[in-house]
Amino acid sequence: MKMDLNSDLGESFGAWTMGDDAAMLDIVSSANVACGFHAGDPAGILKTLKAAKERNVAVGAHVSYPDLVGFGRRNMDIGSADLIASVIYQIGALQGLAQAAGTRVSYVKPHGALYNKIAQDRRQADDVIKALLAIDKSLVLVVLAGAPLIEWARDAGLSVVAEAFADRAYTPAGELVSRTLAGAVLHDENAITERMLRLVREGALEAIDGSTVRIEAESICVHGDSPGAVSIARNLRERFERENIRIASFAG
């Protein structure tokens, strides 16, 4: 069996450090790199891209609403023209930095509120799809497993990878539990690993109410800014390898 393991990186900003990119890049197979709209500064992003290149880790553009103050986690009713242009702008900026680092952007994973919004909202989803088609049709779109966006993007001609979250709780409907609610973020690395093993083997995991929810995913995310993120990711990878589950990027 094979599974991609990804993390959100490049999110430090000036004097403020977010996560441990170097350590995480020794573990994951794909790096969702911030593009400056929710986090990240050019020098820090370039450093992360160079480190990803050194470790042969695939790179994706972690595009966001323009929301530095809210870390991209606030919903925005942004117009189509602005959203399409901002996604193109972010991807283009990361492509330029990636080229300078000797690597390339092979996929796009929206961040935070944008990620959750387009999973269900047809208008904003179509805007993001149009942006990818306009700048590079070969880019893979990483989306929430089970979301309507999967079919919308595929119908438009994009390649799509469904994603599950190791460190987030799920509702019985297969959606992420809101971060405003208790229990939304998981911290017990052994429990997280057992959940993800079940996901890979059975295509299911336990929802926050104790029920079983079906999740079919090709990639697993560990948030780089979560407490203990590196330890969670390392424990997950080591256990997967012991169980003969190969960690490898969908991007090749």
Image: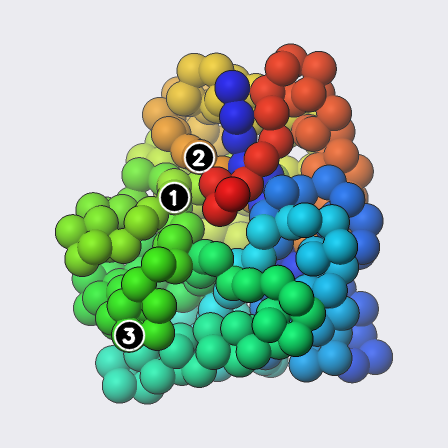
Confirm whether residue 178 shows in the render.
yes
On screen, residue 163 above or below 9: above
Disc marking residue 161: 1
Q: Mark 2 Cα within 10 Å, few/some/many (few <14, many 20+)?
A: some
Question: CA–CA distance between discs 1 and 2?
Answer: 6 Å
Confirm whether residue 124 shows in the render.
no
Disc marking residue 218: 2
Q: Is 50 positioned to the left or the right of 118 in the image? A: right
Tell me residue 50's x, y (percent): 73, 64
Residue type at mark 3 is: Ala
Tell me residue 114's x, y (percent): 40, 65
Q: Which residue is mark 3?
A: 134
Instruction: Give residue 107's quadrant in the image.
Output: bottom left
Camera-nearest label, 1 or 3: 3
Q: Secondary structure at mark 3?
A: helix
Q: Secondary structure at mark 2?
A: loop
Question: CA–CA distance between discs 2 and 3?
Answer: 25 Å
